[in-house]
Image: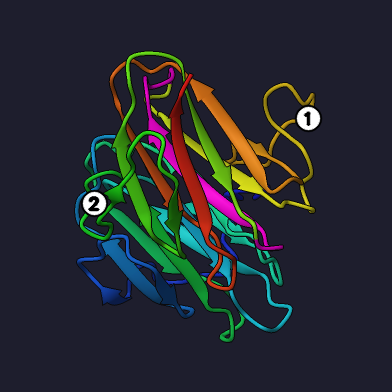
């Protein structure tokens, strides 16, 4: 969904005005030229969400650097209610984020989520019992060593976005899945739909529920509600088959 252009919006001194040198992933809003730095990421999958929350039609952009590497520039489109997602394994390096938008009225909200992060204290996710997650909340449970389903449902007429981390890592070292329900913009995408999902997403659906079926052995399952602040709660059910 989001084009990570290598061309910055304008010349800026990246990291010059840090407002949080010890950012732990909790929701935070960066104004242009402001920076947040996570001193050490996990050596595992983390989901990073960012959204241009300007009320004006201002295109936004973030700079992201990690471990002394070259900056990546993440475009944050104007007037879009759906956060952009970036799933990666930063392998324990720092993650530094700077709002490099041209227009000064271009705030960008950011959030990072992953198991064990200090910014997230998961609620229990028992097998067979639904759990309701409000904005930014997380849950974690243990899958049984058999086929399982994770049901993600939003009964409000709002777009809801879930981040799921668990199971074996893919070739890139990631084991994260981002899924949206009530998604009238992107429609039905992902496995068994014939349509590729937006960048950073595993699947999207126009219905109010999505079922992720898996057999990951006896492993932890971590779920986060990455929807916008005005979205309805996300209902999560982990069940055995």
Magenta span has 162? yes
- Front one among 147 and 89: 147
Q: State the image quarter where residue 165 is shown.
A: top left
* Residue 7 x/y as whole percent: 59, 55
Examine the rendering and report whether any part of residue 18 can be seen: yes
Q: Is residue 170 above or below residue 207?
A: above
Q: Is residue 234 left or right of residue 138?
A: right
| Count of all numbered marks drawn on residues in the image | 2
Identify the residue under disc 2: 117
Identify the residue under disc 1: 195
Examine the rendering and report whether any part of residue 45 can be seen: no
* Residue 216 x/y as whole percent: 38, 18
| Residue drawn at (32%, 75%) of the image | 16
| Residue drawn at (38%, 67%) of the image | 14
* Residue 171 x/y as whole percent: 43, 17
* Real-space Cα separation, disc 2 to disc 1, in angstroms: 33 Å
| Residue drawn at (48%, 45%) of the image | 236
Q: Which residues are magenta?
A: 156-171
């Amino acid at each position: 969904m989001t084009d990570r252009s290598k061309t910055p919006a304008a010349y800026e001194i990246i990291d010059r005005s840090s407002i949080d040198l010890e950012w732990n992933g909790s929701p935070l809003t960066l104004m242009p030229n402001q920076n947040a730095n996570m001193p050490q990421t996990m050596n595992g999958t983390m989901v990073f969400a960012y959204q241009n929350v300007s009320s004006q039609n201002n295109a936004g952009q973030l700079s992201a650097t990690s471990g002394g590497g070259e900056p990546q520039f993440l475009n944050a489109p104007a007037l879009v209610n759906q956060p952009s997602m970036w799933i990666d394994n930063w392998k324990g390096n720092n993650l530094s984020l700077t709002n490099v938008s041209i227009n000064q009225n271009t705030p960008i909200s950011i959030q990072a989520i992953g198991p064990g992060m200090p910014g997230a204290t998961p609620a229990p996710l028992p097998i067979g019992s639904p759990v309701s997650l409000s904005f930014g909340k997380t849950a974690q449970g243990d899958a049984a060593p058999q086929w399982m389903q994770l049901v993600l449902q939003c009964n409000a007429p709002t777009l809801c976005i879930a981040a799921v981390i668990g199971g074996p890592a893919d070739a890139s070292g990631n084991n994260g899945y981002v899924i949206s329900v009530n998604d009238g913009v992107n429609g039905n995408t992902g496995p068994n739909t014939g349509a590729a999902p937006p960048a950073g997403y595993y699947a999207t659906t126009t219905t109010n529920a999505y079922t992720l079926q898996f057999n990951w052995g006896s492993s932890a399952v971590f779920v986060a509600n990455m929807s916008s602040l005005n979205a309805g709660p996300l209902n999560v059910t982990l069940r055995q088959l």
